[in-house]
Image: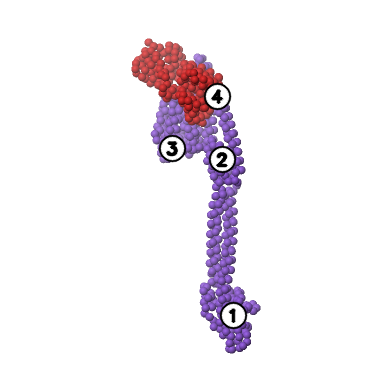
């Protein structure tokens, strides 16, 4: 997916950019509202990540102008203020959702997914692998015309494996993607979800292979 | 919040008291003057009748060769008899000799002065008499003789009339006093109404309303209004500076925290060294904990502030609950927790401060998702009954481990079994404070079969 990140703090912007690109997203960075306008004029984005306090204005004014201009790119606001006081105001001014800094990227991604799912008319995001079709937004895999719904962690696990087929992912790497960093989990917890995902992929040529002592990888037969 | 304040005596009380004292004095004065005038009037009237009777008798006095001849006219006494049961005495004297009548009826001092009656009061045989005396010259055996006619009358009738008059005067005085007191209270109310209106207009304002007061105020209150407006302006300035400061402070603290967290996540993705990973995880947890504490402290401060200065409105608790539940869906989804909603379709009207209620609901739902086991269901139900709305938020998780709700609603107090769940110990404090402020109640208990069940009760509007 392609994001426009409007954030004036260089350090944060760069780390968000790096972090999102690790998940295979493209991120353009606009340090000012003016620069954001320029970007929006020359490219289309799936989502805008908007900071509120910017050197050349208030993000909420930008948001209001954005909505008045009938541009429907979804916007997720990154607020640094207390969630209670800002929530209503933010949603009223046209934000699709918001996250409070510092945010968990897994949660950001979940919210992005929820926003995009609510929005109709978003370009198809399906991916094909072997004989199956995967739609991350609706969280389904279609195997031989049979659509199977993936639960959240199965979906995330599949996304990770599908981002680099044939590459071996360690249990630790997979855990990072499936569990919050704040949660303490053993690496073995991943086995449960690998097992479930395997059942969902049943009947397909795609399969998850255990590489003993190292991890897992997605392959096709 | 009404706080007991030492107040000087109220203007209203003082005003009413002063007016009532004046009214009492005036009523007394009125009573006395009516009585005096009535006394005088009754006495004058009685005297005239007595005088007329005396003069009538004097008219009938005839001199002759044999002496004085008098034919006491009946009309003279019937005139006097008009008043009550009074007794009448008479005496006709020539020189010092009593010609007829009671010879001990007191004679006037000195000489009588012709037909113009002289009036005087004297005791006579155990009663008080009012007496009129006239003198007349008659010819007896060709000689001019001075005859004195004295008529006395008891004063019971007059006393009765005076007493009657006095009663009426007293009733009049009392009536005047009552009317004056009522008018005083009304007047005090009218005089103080502009002050009360002004106080109401200021008191009714919401916490965000810092506009100057434009209400018409009497000239006497103008300096007060001007001073108040000056104060409001200064307060507004200070508040907006504080708000800006807090917002900027939060921005400047949370933005670097966000950077630290993002960098730690990136580093976690790039390293396989267990020790480093453990260290990075604790960095993430520390960032989350400090951000959460800061956020909850701010929320708590907001709740405390708004509890004092809340802007109550009628709102649909059902819609609010649905809204909050939806906002938490992605968060719940991360732990594969399903939020099950059981909320009536029809609006559930409560009166309360939207921000406060929302903050209470958020904390309840957030808690349930945090402490629930993964892949379970969080049940949110809104029930009605007995003039109250009840929001139940139940999870399947570690529960309370015997800790009472009372302990958990204390500031910075957390359960014994929170384990590694990041929290500030303020969530349930906020919920409890909101419940108290809204006239409701809050409780959290262990759920049968594991987990906790939080109940927030609010009065329906």
Determine which residue is flagged by label 1. B149
Quick check: B14 above or below B336?
below
Determine which residue is flagged by label 4. A54
Do the residues indicated by labels 2 and 4 lie within the same chain of the protein?
no
Taking B133 as reference, is B437 left or right?
A: left
- Residue B306 drawn at (x, y percent): 52, 35
Chain A in the picture: what colour?
red
Q: Is residue B342 visible?
A: yes
Chain B in the picture: what colour?
purple
Quick check: B224 above or below B393?
below
Q: Tag 3, which secondary structure?
A: strand
Q: Which mark is residue B349?
A: 3
Determine which residue is flagged by label 2. B213
Subunit bearing disc 3: B
Viewer-nearest of discs 3 and 2? 2
Do the residues indicated by labels 3 and 4 lie within the same chain of the protein?
no
Earlier residue among tags 1 and 3: 1
Q: Which mark is residue A51?
A: none
Q: CA distance from mark 3 to mark 2?
A: 32 Å
- Residue B450 drawn at (x, y percent): 42, 29
Q: CA distance from mark 4 to mark 1?
A: 121 Å
Q: CA distance from mark 2 to mark 4?
A: 35 Å
Subunit bearing disc 4: A
User: Would you call the spot at circle 3 few (<14 residues within 10 Å), some (14-19), or many (20 or more)?
Assistant: some
Contact (CB < 8 A) between labels 1 and 3? no
Earlier residue among tags 1 and 2: 1
């Amino acid at each position: 997916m392609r994001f426009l990140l409007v954030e004036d703090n260089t350090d944060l912007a760069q780390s968000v950019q790096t972090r999102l690109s690790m998940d295979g997203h493209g991120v353009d960075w606009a340090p000012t509202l003016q620069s954001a306008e320029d970007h929006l004029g020359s490219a289309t984005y799936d989502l805008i990540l908007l900071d509120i306090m910017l050197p050349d204005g208030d993000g909420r004014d930008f948001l209001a102008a954005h909505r008045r201009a009938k541009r429907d790119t979804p916007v997720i606001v990154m607020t640094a203020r207390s969630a209670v006081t800002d929530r209503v105001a933010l949603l009223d001014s046209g934000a699709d959702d918001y996250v409070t800094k510092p945010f968990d990227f897994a949660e950001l991604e979940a919210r992005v997914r929820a926003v995009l799912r609510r929005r109709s008319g978003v370009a198809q995001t399906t991916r094909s692998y072997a004989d199956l079709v995967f739609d991350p937004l609706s969280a389904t895999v279609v195997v031989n015309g049979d659509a199977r719904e993936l639960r959240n962690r199965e979906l995330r696990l599949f996304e990770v494996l599908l981002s680099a087929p044939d590459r071996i992912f360690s249990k630790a790497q997979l855990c990072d993607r499936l569990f919050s960093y704040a949660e303490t989990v053993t690496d073995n917890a991943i086995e449960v979800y690998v097992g479930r995902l395997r059942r969902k992929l049943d009947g397909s040529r795609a399969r998850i292979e255990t590489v003993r002592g190292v991890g897992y990888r997605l392959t096709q037969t | 919040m009404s706080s007991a304040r030492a107040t000087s005596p109220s203007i209203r009380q003082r005003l009413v008291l002063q007016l009532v004292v004046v009214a009492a004095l005036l009523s007394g004065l009125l009573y006395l003057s009516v009585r005096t005038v009535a006394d005088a009037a009754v006495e004058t009237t009685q005297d005239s009748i007595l005088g007329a009777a005396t003069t009538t008798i004097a008219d009938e006095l005839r001199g002759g060769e044999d002496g004085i001849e008098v034919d006491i006219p009946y009309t003279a006494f019937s005139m006097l008899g008009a008043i009550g049961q009074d007794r009448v005495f008479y005496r006709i004297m020539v020189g010092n000799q009593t010609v007829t009548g009671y010879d001990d009826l007191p004679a006037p001092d000195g000489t009588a002065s012709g037909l113009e009656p002289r009036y005087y009061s004297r005791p006579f045989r155990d009663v008080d008499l009012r007496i009129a005396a006239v003198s007349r010259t008659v010819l007896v055996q060709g000689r001019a003789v001075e005859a004195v006619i004295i008529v006395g009358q008891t004063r019971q009738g007059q006393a009765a009339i005076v007493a009657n008059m006095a009663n009426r005067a007293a009733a009049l005085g009392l009536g005047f006093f009552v009317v004056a007191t009522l008018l005083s209270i009304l007047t005090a109310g009218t005089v103080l109404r502009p002050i009360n209106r002004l106080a109401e207009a200021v008191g009714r304002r919401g916490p965000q309303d810092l506009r100057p007061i434009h209400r018409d105020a009497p000239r006497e209150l103008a300096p007060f209004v001007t001073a108040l407006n000056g104060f409001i302006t200064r307060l507004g300035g200070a508040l907006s500076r504080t708000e800006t400061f807090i917002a900027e402070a939060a921005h400047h603290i949370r933005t670097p925290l966000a950077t630290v967290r993002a960098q730690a996540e990136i580093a976690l993705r790039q390293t396989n060294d267990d020790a480093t990973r453990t260290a990075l995880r604790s960095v993430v947890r520390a960032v989350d904990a400090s951000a959460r504490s800061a956020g909850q402290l701010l929320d708590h401060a907001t709740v405390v502030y708004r509890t004092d200065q809340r802007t109550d409105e009628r709102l649909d608790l059902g819609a609010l609950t649905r809204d909050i539940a939806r906002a938490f869906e992605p968060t719940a989804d991360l732990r594969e927790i399903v939020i099950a909603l059981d909320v009536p379709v029809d609006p559930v009207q409560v009166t309360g401060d939207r921000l406060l209620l929302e903050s209470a609901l958020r904390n309840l739902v957030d808690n349930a998702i945090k402490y629930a086991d993964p892949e379970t269901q969080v049940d949110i139900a809104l029930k009605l009954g007995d003039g109250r709305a009840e929001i139940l938020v139940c999870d399947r998780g570690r529960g309370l481990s015997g800790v009472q709700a009372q302990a958990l609603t204390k500031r910075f107090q957390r359960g014994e079994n929170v384990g590694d769940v990041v929290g500030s110990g303020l969530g349930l404090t906020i919920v409890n404070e909101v419940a108290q402020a809204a006239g409701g109640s809050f409780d959290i208990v262990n759920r049968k079969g594991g987990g906790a069940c939080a109940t927030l009760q609010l009065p329906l509007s």
